[in-house]
Image (tube, rainbow, N blue to C red):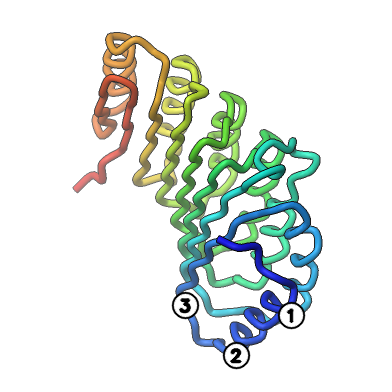
Amino acid sequence: MPEPSRRLSIMESFYLSRLRLLENLQSYTTLRKGTIRDEAPQLKKNLRKPYKIKSLDVTSSATGQWASMGMDKNHSLQALKQVLGIFPHLETMKLKLIKIPSSFEGILTFFDVVSFLPNLHCLEWEFLNCHISDLEVIAFAQGLAKIQQIKYFSLKVIQNLSISEDCIEKVACAISRLPHLSKFNLYFRKLSIHPRGILELGKRIENFGENIQCICSKESIYIYKTVTE
């Protein structure tokens, strides 16, 4: 996807500003050096009035220098904070990040931002080759404990840099104990854990509750909570 020009971004925000009855919004962007720094402030300036959007689906990927930059150079979270303020009616948010770095502090800050969205009840995150660590996964458990309005949560982590067995077990345990989550899905793929270890991990996690189920394969584990009839 080519990098959008400032003029194109202004035109997009202008036409979007005329769609006040729009309820579902999908966004697909590729971040390149300078894009967020130069265009996010202009986007915020042109999108000042609240929207009636209830569903937000965002896919962002990083190429070139962005993919290897640390969090001190990554302004994607800042841009997200600027934009979310115009969506007070948001109910469902789906975020897919491709090769975009994340941090423990950044994820907790994100939850601080969405705590001001009273109608948000569904949150889905997918990390593809983002090289997140155990610490970032733990941040989701801590953030979810503070956001009581979320009823459904989904987290997918697909990457070669493995999340540890201990982290998966502790996070699954913490999330399974949150009373406001009626349903959740956790998926980790390309694990470096021995297949037998993944099976044993799944059995331990299923003991967290009668509605907790696990599907294990050679390099992945899928953990989910079913809805009680």
Residue on which the image places disc 3:
23
Earlier residue among tags 3 and 2: 2
Q: Which residue is mark 1?
A: 46
Q: Is residue 81 above or below residue 98?
A: below
Q: Quadrant of the N terminus?
A: bottom right
| Inter-mark Cα distance, 2 to 1 | 11 Å
Helix, strand or loop at disc 1? helix
**Residue drawn at (79%, 43%) of the image:** 73
Expressed as whole percent of the image width and height from the top left, the position of residue 69 reads 73, 38
Whether residue 229 is situated above or below residue 80 in the rendered picture: above
Position of residue 97 measured from the top left corner of the image (x, y, whole percent): 54, 47
Cα separation between marks 3 and 1: 19 Å
* Residue drawn at 38 percent across, 29 percent down: 189
Q: Give the mark toward the camera: 3 or 1.
A: 1
The residue beneath circle 2 is 18
SS for callout 3: loop
In the picture, the disc for residue 54 is none
What residue type is disc 1 on?
Asn
What's under tag 3, amino acid-wise? Glu
Quarter of the image for residue 144 reads top right
Furthest toward the bottom, the residue is 18
**Residue density around tag 2, few if under 14, some if 14–19, many if 20 or more, within 10 Å:** few
Among the two numbered marks 3 and 1 on one chain, the one whose residue lies closer to the N terminus: 3
Q: Quadrant of residue 100?
A: top right
- Picture coordinates of residue 2 (x, y %)? 60, 63
Residue pictured at 26% horizontal, 24% vertical? 216
The residue sitting at 43% across, 32% down in the picture is 177
